Image (cartoon, rainbow, N blue to C red):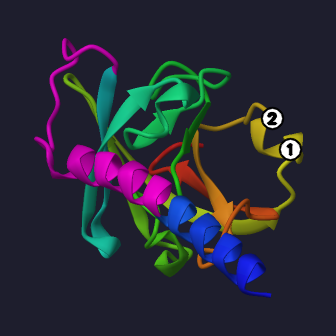
Amino acid sequence: MRAVAIACFLFSVSFIWANVFGWYEAYEAVKRNDQPNAQQGDVIGTLFIPKLNISMPIYEGLQQLNKGVAHDERSALPGKGNHTILAGHRDTVFRKLGDIQRGDEVVIRTNDQTWTYIVQHIRIVKPDDKTVLVPKAHPTLTLITCYPFRWIGDAPNRYVVIAKQKGAG
């Protein structure tokens, strides 16, 4: 019985240790300059959510999730098409996303432009739900994170915030 308890304890400690390092990297990304320069490698802009009082850099490619908010390369860049998808970890950069509500503003800023979106829908979907990737008729921003927020380990669902560009369509 002690061996099982010790094994469970060691597994928990290793899991927490790994998450602390991932959290710290994302936390440092949020603390950096809130108006990144496009020449900083893979930073393509900044995501602002005024209601949640958060500002964080957006990195190109889902492989950048450990740094902060990641642009899904299967979607358009802001201003370059009608559907931009951004993802972030629920326990770091998107830990407050559950507090967002319909009608709240979400802002993306790049070096040359700013886009403001208004939250229209919030959905909870399965990880394999491809409807979040569907092209949209009007400029749309989709934010995705794992759900439930306080789940330990791989979360069974995704929390999806869909926002329409202010003044579009």
Q: Quadrant of the C terminus?
A: top right
Q: How many marks?
A: 2
Give the residue furthest to the bottom.
Answer: 1
Secondary structure type for disc 2: loop
Percent coordinates x, y for residue 147 in the rendering: 69, 68
User: Quick one: label 2, few (<14), some, or many (20+) residues within 10 Å?
Assistant: few
Q: CA distance from mark 2 to mark 1?
A: 5 Å
Tell me which amino acid carries mark 1: Thr
x and y percent of residue 129 in the render? 88, 48
Q: Residue furthest left?
A: 33
Q: Are there few (<14), some (14-19), or many (20+) residues within 10 Å of tag 1?
A: few
Cβ atoms at labels 2 and 1 below 8 Å apart:
yes
Q: Which residues are magenta?
A: 17-42
Residue 35 visible in image: yes
The residue that mark 1 highlights is 131
> Seen in the image, is 29 located left or right of residue 95?
left
Res. 90 in view: no
Residue type at mark 2: give it.
Answer: Val
Is residue 27 found inside the magenta-colored segment of the image? yes
Residue at 49% of width from left, 38% of height from top?
Answer: 65
Residue 161 vs residue 94, the one in the foreground: 94
- The picture places residue 8, in percent across and down from the top left corner, at 69, 75
Left or right of 37? Residue 89 is right
> Residue under circle 2?
134
Residue plotted at (69% across, 70% down):
7
